[in-house]
Amino acid sequence: MVFLFIFGAVFGSFACCQVWRIRKKDKSKFSHCLHCKYQLRWYDNIPIISWLSLGGKCRKCKKKIGYAEILAEVGLAVAFVLSFVLWPNREALVNIDILEIVKFVLFLVQLTIFTVLFIYDAKWCELPLGLMLGSLGVAVVFECLAIWPNFDGFNWLSFAGCLLILPGFYFAMYKISNECWVGGGDWILCLPLAVMLGDFWLGLMCVFAANVIGSAVMLPVAIKNKNKKMKVPFGPFLILGFLVIFFARELIFNFLVI
Ligand SMILES: [Zn+2]
């Protein structure tokens, strides 16, 4: 778990760096300060520790680095550990089942991609298409590995239902409202989420969870700014809703059986 925490923090730092690289179409090899272009040394790049020791400021110009960096590093570190603790087939993971380990690693890769999408959408209300397609690729491989050992028992109808309820629903909202209620990227982000959930009921619950989380977070903000027109990024809520449902799937299935 300590190893996963450190790994998560490193990938959180990497994810945050990628957000700016994608935004600024930056291909430079080294990270630098956005204000004074100070090229970061290795000791400025230690996840969590560097941010805390510098008080969230650049070493040279002392301008604020921002909270996204530390939140991404701590957030992904915790997410990596929680993924292991809550993993549906943890016994296979502990017993070093190769298939399960590959699935787990793919899931961690997906979490890292989600972190980039989460920050990008929260900052600019946009979702980079290339990254979402990359996420879809990871999701397809993940689901193939999940279905493969039990190919005959897979419920394809439920899988199709999940595609209809998640990406289908947001695509319809996007088209009907002329991009007013949800953005054009949200339904594409729903594709990898739906593929990884792979079940109609889980898809429906994901829509529900995303909307509950979204309302809980945005309602107080909306009441405060009631006279202003607001643009709300929905991607972060979809990702959070997905994570809740992905790890609560056993609970949900038990409930449905009852
Ligand atoms: Zn600086």
Image: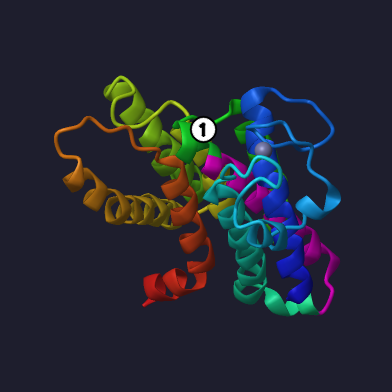
Determine crowd level at label 1: few under 14, some 14-19, many 20+ residues with C-alpha closer than 10 A. Answer: many
- Percent coordinates x, y for residue 41 in the rendering: 83, 46
Q: Residue at x 61, y 71 (%)?
A: 82
- Percent coordinates x, y for residue 218 in the rendering: 29, 48
81 sits to left or right of 160: right
The residue range painted magenta reads 95-119
- Image quarter where the N terminus lies is bottom right
- Percent coordinates x, y for residue 239 in the rendering: 49, 50
- Percent coordinates x, y for residue 246 in the rendering: 53, 61
Q: Is residue 99 magenta?
A: yes
- Check the image and report above or below for 220 versus 7: above
Residue beneath label 1, please? 188
- Quarter of the image for residue 230 reads top left
What residue occupies the far left of the structure in this picture?
Answer: 227
**Secondary structure of residue under mark 1:** helix
- Check the image and report above or below for 77 versus 17: below
Q: Residue at x 32, y 32 (%)?
A: 231
Q: Quadrant of ligand 1?
A: top right
Three-letter amino acid code of the residue under disc 1: Ile
- Check the image and report above or below for 231 versus 147: above
- Name the residue nearer the viewer: 245 or 48: 48
The mark tally for this picture is 1
- Quarter of the image for residue 213 reads bottom left
- Image quarter where the C terminus lies is bottom left
95 sits to left or right of 151: right
Question: Is residue 68 at least partly visible in the picture?
Answer: yes
Q: Is residue 245 magenta?
A: no
Question: Is residue 142 at least partly visible in the picture?
Answer: no
Q: Residue at x 54, y 43 (%)?
A: 119
- Quarter of the image for residue 107 reads bottom right
